[in-house]
Amino acid sequence: MSSSFGFSRSLPEEFLLLCMLHNVGAIASEKSLTIEEICKWTLMEASALRVHLQKLTELGYVQLIKAEGVDKYHVTPSGITKVLTLYS
């Protein structure tokens, strides 16, 4: 994943992903992104993304929704709070 978001590469990759989702505006169900869309933003493989998204979902930072039969992901309010703590 590109480190152009201004974060240290010492952060776990899933939190870099969380920040990217936040920064591109995937912060509500109507702005959720598919795995394919996230792959384009992150340059990560879909299999690695799924692992990170599963962990972020389990932590309550990302929510999975089904839209027209397609899995989409967006940052939850808890995830937004987590991102904001990384900036401070």
Image (cartoon, rainbow, N blue to C red):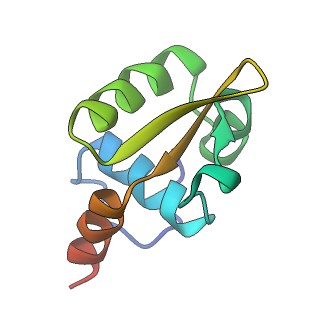
Identity of the residue drawn at 41% across and 31% down: 53
In the image, residue 60 sits, relative to residue 35, either above or below, namely below
Identity of the residue drawn at 31% across and 50% down: 15
Number of disc labels? 0
Residue 57 at least partly seen:
yes
From the top left corner, tell me how far across and down residue 18 is, in percent. Answer: 40, 52
Q: Left or right of 14: which side holds 3?
A: right
Of 2 and 83, the residue lying toward us? 83
Residue 3 at least partly seen:
no
From the top left corner, tell me how far across and down residue 5 is, in percent. Answer: 49, 68
Snapshot quadrant of residue 31 = bottom right
Q: Which residue ends up furthest to the right in the rendered image? A: 68
Q: Left or right of 73: which side holds 10?
A: left
Identity of the residue drawn at 23% across and 53% down: 11
In the image, residue 23 sits, relative to residue 72, either above or below, namely below
Identity of the residue drawn at 74% across and 17% down: 69
From the top left corner, tell me how far across and down residue 77 is, in percent. Answer: 35, 63
From the top left corner, tell me how far across and down residue 85 is, in percent. Answer: 20, 75
